[in-house]
Image (spheres, rainbow, N blue to C red):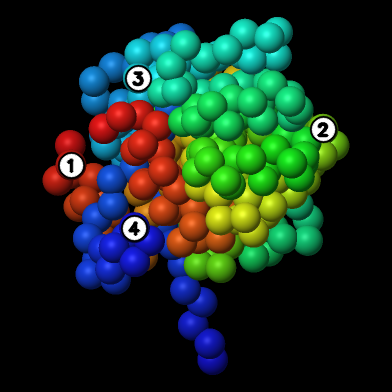
Amino acid sequence: MFSEWKQKLNRGVALAYYDLVFGSCDIDSELPGRLGFKKIGIVDEDIQVVDVSGGKKANSTDAIAVGPAGAALIGEASRGVKSILIKDYSLDNSLVAAIAENNTILVMPVSDLMKVSGIKRSRLMFKMQRLVESAKKHKIQVAFVTMADSRGNMCSYMQLIELSKLIGADGDYARRSVSETNRVLVND
Amino acid sequence: MIRQKHRYILVESSQKIAEGNLDAFSAALYEALLDYVGGLQYHKVNPKVVKLADDRHFIIKSNLSGCGSLIAALALIKNVSNEATYFYTLKTSGTIRALLSNTKKSA
């Protein structure tokens, strides 16, 4: 998959980029094109988000399991859920190993960086960076999406790629994630 | 002499910018950018608002090496001169002419 993508990039073929946001963003039909995305997926329309912290389980494997790092998320990864979002971005080696083993996608919502400021943002950036670097080491697919809850927290594809670089992705890896990995999430 | 290369970025603002207010808006934007990029990196970005395309779009110039930092900083800025504002970077180009012609084509 990677070599095919690399060939596309070398041939100068324009890549299609994807994002995932909440329904409260109120997206009109021309906004995705203006921001440079082929499609902006909407949570609960294109993919379900299930909070597994309270012992709840995702109904289908075609969902994003959300929760703190721990047994619940390891269980969801073993069950074959499509993607996982670690709520507190803490690095749990057994969880990372379970994600790598089951080819689960790790979701990184970059709009969290926009909701905090100052030293809190720097700390969050450090935590996210540590998680992304660990994921890269274990060859885990990472989906950099905004998961914005308002228009103010949305961004264009260029901004999404640059924010991905801030949290540990290099240029090619970030572009590949926003293009190929996000496409899997938004079911295009 | 080494020629400094630039990138021009077309930016959409949520806040309306009046033509007479461009200098005040630019000054407030530079201050916000300084906050995000940091004093040690600001010279690498060297931002300059060069043109107002319409009341919500403007073109900002940066050094080629600092272009990525500028795009990331524009995503993180949520407040300019005490007014809630957000920015979308729509296109980048090496020349203003190419940037504007691409924008007209896509419009």
> Label 1 belongs to which residue?
B106
Q: Residue furthest right?
A: A119
The residue that appears at 49% across and 57% down in the rendered structure is: A173
The residue that appears at 34% across and 66% down in the rendered structure is: A3
- Callout 2 and callout 1 share a chain: no
> Label 2 belongs to which residue?
A120
- Callout 3 and callout 2 share a chain: yes
Q: CA distance from mark 1 to mark 3?
A: 28 Å
> Which amino acid, mark 3?
Asp
> Label 4 belongs to which residue?
A1
- Callout 4 and callout 1 share a chain: no
Q: CA distance from mark 4 to mark 3?
A: 23 Å
Q: CA distance from mark 2 to mark 1?
A: 39 Å
To which quarter of the image does residue A112 belong? top right
A150, above or below B8, in the image: above
- Viewer-side residue, A125 vs B30: A125
Q: Marks 3 and 2: which is nearer the front?
A: 3
> Which amino acid, mark 4?
Met
Task: Please report, as a chain letter, where disc 1 is located.
Answer: B
